[in-house]
Image (tube, grey):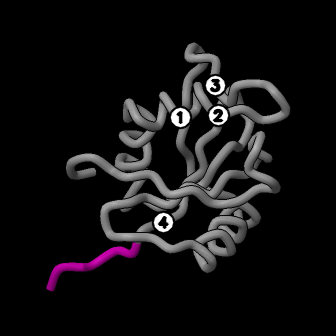
């Protein structure tokens, strides 16, 4: 009988700073999300305290979330309205113009 694994929670580090958490099937899928054009564009566009989250140069790194990061993700997910073609991004930093840390949904193009 095939084993069905539940998604795990991962954190995106930008230059060593935990920036957002999200769910993925496995670490490979989490790494693939880091290379998605839409995510890279968002990370370059979004700012925290007037500074872009990503400068377009440093490596975006996915890793398994710590317990605190996973808890932050679950809290954001509890209040989020999400459709099946979206991925929930729980930001671990304050975004300019968005209030305190929180969740945002991003449409996922194609099959992840």
Q: Earlier in the sequence, mark 4 or mark 3?
A: 4
9 w.r.t. 96: above or below: below
* Separation (CA) of disc 4 from disc 3: 24 Å
Q: Mark 4 — residue?
A: 8
Q: Quadrant of the N terminus?
A: bottom left
* Separation (CA) of disc 3 from disc 1: 9 Å
Q: Earlier in the sequence, mark 4 or mark 2?
A: 4
Q: Magenta residues: mostly which secondary structure?
A: loop
Read off the magenta span. 1-6
**Image depth: mark 3 or mark 2 in front:** 2
Q: Mark 1 — residue?
A: 42
- Whether 2 is among the magenta residues is yes
Q: Mark 2 — residue?
A: 46
Q: Position of residue 53 (x, y in %)?
A: 68, 30
Classify mark 1: helix, strand or loop: helix
Tell me if 103 is positioned left or right of 93 in this view: left
Q: Position of residue 25 (x, y in %)?
A: 36, 61
Tell me if 6 is positioned left or right of 15 in this view: left
Q: Earlier in the sequence, mark 4 or mark 1?
A: 4
| Residue at (34, 74) in percent of width and height | 5
**Image depth: mark 4 or mark 2 in front:** 2
| Residue at (77, 46) in percent of width and height | 93
* Separation (CA) of disc 4 from disc 2: 25 Å
Check disc 1: other Cα within 10 Å, few if <14, some if 14-19, many if 20+: some
Disc assigned to residue 54: 3
């Amino acid at each position: 009988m095939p084993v069905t694994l539940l998604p795990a929670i991962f954190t995106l580090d930008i230059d060593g700073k935990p920036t957002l958490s999200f769910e993925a099937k496995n670490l490979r899928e989490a790494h693939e999300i880091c290379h998605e054009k839409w995510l890279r564009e968002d990370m370059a566009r979004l700012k925290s305290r007037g500074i872009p989250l990503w400068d377009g140069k440093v490596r975006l790194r996915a890793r398994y979330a710590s317990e605190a990061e996973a808890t932050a993700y679950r809290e954001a997910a509890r209040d989020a309205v999400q459709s099946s073609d979206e991925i929930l991004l729980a930001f671990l930093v304050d975004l300019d113009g968005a209030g305190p840390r929180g969740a945002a949904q991003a449409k996922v193009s194609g099959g992840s």
